[in-house]
Structure formats: structure tokens, C-alpha cells
Image (spheres, rainbow, N blue to C red):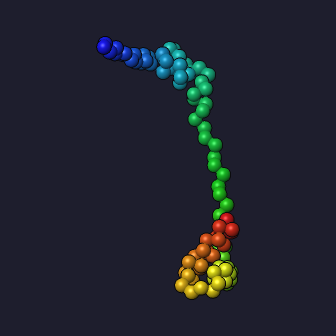
Amino acid sequence: MATESVKKTKAPAKGKSAAKAQTGETEGGVNAAPTIAATKTSKVAAKPKVVATSAPSHDEIAQLAASYWAERGWQDGYAEQDWLRAERELLGAAS
């Protein structure tokens, strides 16, 4: 069996005239009208995100944590998890 090898050709390098055409320069040193490539450099400013400034109060967190405790049938041993879950819920609802 014979195997064929295929050579890939490289694209020709850009000359000085191609670079000048992109920047709008001409041979005489006078700039032509800006090209599309030159006008695409402006960026649109992103809108700032609104951040909640007030955190939930201690009492709000305690009430929600107590409701989670009641949902579990007042089972002991999960107070910290209930508290952290209540904080996450209230902070997520605030933003």
C-alpha cells in the first residue's frame, strides 16, 4: 500500500501595503478614512450590579432557623446548619 503525504501551504505574509491599508495610511503619508477594523476598538461599558446594603437581622435569621428546626420535628444536633441555611436564604432573597 502506498501512502500519500499532503503538504499544507502557508498563507502569504502581509506586506507593508496591506498593513498600511488597515491603518488608513497611504504611500504619501496622508491618512485615508478610518477602516472598519480601526472603528471596532471602542468597548461598551458594563452596567454595575446592584448590591444589597442591609444584612438580615439576628431575629430574622433566628425565626427562619427555628422554622427549619420545626420542619425536622425539633430534632437536636442541627442548629448550626439551620442557622447557616437561614442566613443563605435571607441573603439570597435580599439581592
Q: Along the horizontal axis of the image, is 60 left or right of 79?
A: right
Q: Along the horizontal axis of the image, is 16 left or right of 63?
A: left
Q: Across the whole image, how many numbered discs are drawn on residues?
A: 0
Q: Compared to 33, does 48 lie above or below?
A: below
Give the residue displayed 63% in from the left and 81% down from the top.
72
- Determine which quarter of the picture holds residue 24: top right
| Residue 58 seen from this side | no
Give the residue displayed 67% in from the left and 65% down from the top.
95
| Residue 74 seen from this side | yes
As rendered, which of 66 and 37 lies closer to the eye?
66
- Where is residue 63? Give x, y as percent: 68, 83
Give the residue displayed 60% in from the left and 74% down from the top.
85
- Where is residue 88? Give x, y as percent: 61, 71
Q: Along the horizontal axis of the image, is 80 left or right of 67?
A: left
Give the residue displayed 48% in from the left and 16% down from the top.
17
- Where is residue 25? Give x, y as percent: 53, 20
